[in-house]
Amino acid sequence: MNEKKVKNVGGQAVIEGVMMKSPDRIATAVRRSNGEIVYKVKELSKNNKFLSKIPFIRGGFILIESLFVGIKELTFSANQFEEEEEDLSDFQLALTVFVSMSLGVGLFILLPSFISNFIFQNSLSSANILEAILRMIFFIVYIKLISFSKDIKRVFQYHGAEHKSIYTFENNEKLTKENAKKYTTLHPRCGTSFLLIVMIISIIIYSLVDIFLPTPDTLLMKQVMKLSTRILLLPFVAGASYEFQKYTSRHLKNPIIRLLAAPGLKLQNITTKEPDFDQLEVGVVALRAALGETIENAKDITEEELQ
């Protein structure tokens, strides 16, 4: 079997660029405002991956790790595009991740629960149904609204370049922008699909928990209990969602599995856009760098970043 077939790669779009992650490295490539492509590579430690191998626990661990890496690489890409030298301190990075997670949990998890519990104070089933509807509406409307931003559209194009580059690799083709061009922008392991799965899995898990937990007498205690369980069970929700996505992405030939994966792929029609050849070139550079290949059409600034 070809070595490429056994490596699992993934990534994300950044400002005018793409971050790619292989089992051994993280690489981020950015096209500067002058047209030059630069990239940096970070070797990954083999000693801190224990939690990432435990089923139903690794999902939450990988989610938090991805947030830290994603925000750091977004900062790097913004600095490179503007050719600045600012960087986030460890405290600033942690604070940014905390605020981002708090806003996401508050808007998509806690707020729908609070509203539904307030409207249907005496009907658990009605409250849970409304909570599920609100959670999905908030999430989809948010994704749609940000898609109208010109800058976000550029990010979504690089998101498409990321997926096309990964498809080229997974089909064992030479990593070129010409080969990547023919592939779809929709990928079953996408973060957009993962977030949608989190929304759906949370509906199921939270509803089951509400059925078995005793119902408090006062509205205040109902709200406290509901919001507390939503937060405490979030790592398990993320873990279950990760395992579901991992399984479905490997069994898409099964028509039932393909049907289950369809909503996530459909939502990617919003979060991915068709990239041009320049954007594909950046995506390919990032993936080749993450795989440890020699790159001639971009500048390696890894040493500059370490100084």
Image: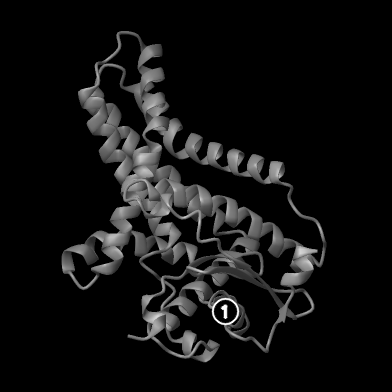
Q: Quadrant of the C terminus?
A: bottom right
Q: Is residue 168 left or right of residue 301?
A: left
Spot the residue most to the front: 47
Rendered location of residue 189, percent (x, y): 38, 64
Report whether 241 appears left or right of 260.
right
Percent x, y of residue 75: 70, 57
Q: Residues within 10 Å of mark 1 (few under 14, many from 20)?
A: some
Using the image, determine if residue 203 lies above or below residue 197. above
Residue at point 50%, 34% (across, down): 106
Q: Is residue 94 left or right of residue 225?
A: right
Rendered image quadrant of residue 37: bottom right
Which residue is at 46% across, 73% downward? 163
Q: Quadrant of the N terminus?
A: bottom left
Residue 61 versus residue 175 in the image, above or below: above
- The residue lying toward the viewer, choosing from 138 and 69, is 69
Of helix, strand and loop, which one carries label 1? Answer: loop
Q: Position of residue 277 (x, y in %)?
A: 59, 85
- Total count of labels: 1
| Residue occupied by mark 1 | 292
Nearer the observer, 38 or 274: 38
For this orientation, the residue located farthest to the top is 217
Residue occupying image coordinates x 56% and y 80%: 288
The amino acid sitting under disc 1 is Gly
- Above or below, 162 relative to 181: above
- Residue 51, percent from left and from top: 42, 49
